[in-house]
Image (cartoon, rainbow, N blue to C red):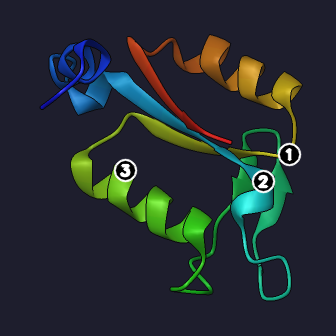
Amino acid sequence: MATNMEKQLIGIDPAQRILLLSYCLRRAETCKGKNTNQGLECNECNPDCPANQLRQAAIRLGYKGVCIAPGGRLAIEYVKDNRPLAIVAVA
């Protein structure tokens, strides 16, 4: 059974959502992504990487954007720049 929060999220078009991921979710030992002012630019180098898997799922669903952030300040700026109606965050 869906919670009230899940029902609210379902009601928002994925194109109006962003996914915020913590930088520590990436597989540091194999990560070939580069840091940008929009977060880690994922190169999809490791199919077993949780950050890559979650990012790909959000892209398939049509999310407005995905930010793999090394810190809270960058995540806040990403939200301000993209102005989503909903945020899904994994820390």
Label 2 – label 1 distance at C-alpha? 5 Å
Quarter of image, res 12: top left
The quadrant of the rendering that contains the C terminus is top right
- Image x and y of residue 6, in percent: 26, 24
In the drawing, does residue 45 fall left or right of residue 14? Answer: right
Per the image, label 2 sits on a secondary structure element best described as helix
Q: Which residue is drawn at 82% across and 39% down?
A: 37
Q: Marks 2 and 3: CB-CB under 8 Å?
A: no
State the residue in front, 19 or 4: 4
Towards the viewer: 40 or 89:
89
Q: Mark 1 points at which residue?
A: 70
Taking the spot 35% from the left edge, 54% from the top edge, the residue there is: 59
Q: In this view, does 2 lie to the left or right of 78?
A: left
User: Would you say the residues marked 2 and 1 are in contact, meaning their CB atoms lie under 8 Å apart?
Assistant: yes
Which residue is painted at 84% across and 76% down in the image?
28
Q: Is mark 3 on a helix, strand or loop?
A: helix
Kind of residue at badge 3: Ala
Rate crowding at label 3 as few (under 14), some (14 to 19) or many (20 or more) other CA atoms within 10 Å.
Answer: many
Q: Are marks 1 and 3 in contact (CB under 8 Å)?
A: no
The residue located at (64%, 66%) in the rendering is: 42
User: Separation of disc 1 and disc 3 at Cα?
Assistant: 19 Å
Q: Counting residues from the N terminus, which is met first, the one under dot 2 or under dot 3?
A: 2
Location of residue 21 with respect to 10 vertically, above or below: below
Residue picked out by circle 3: 58
18 versus 80 height, above or below: below
Residue denoted by label 2:
23
Mark 1 or mark 3, earlier in chain: 3
Earlier in the chain: of badge 2 and badge 1, it is 2
Whether residue 28 is situated above or below residue 72 in the rendered picture: below
Which of the pair 3/70 is nearer the observer? Answer: 3
Q: Position of residue 3 (x, y in %)?
A: 24, 21
Looking at the image, which is closer to me, 21 or 3?
3
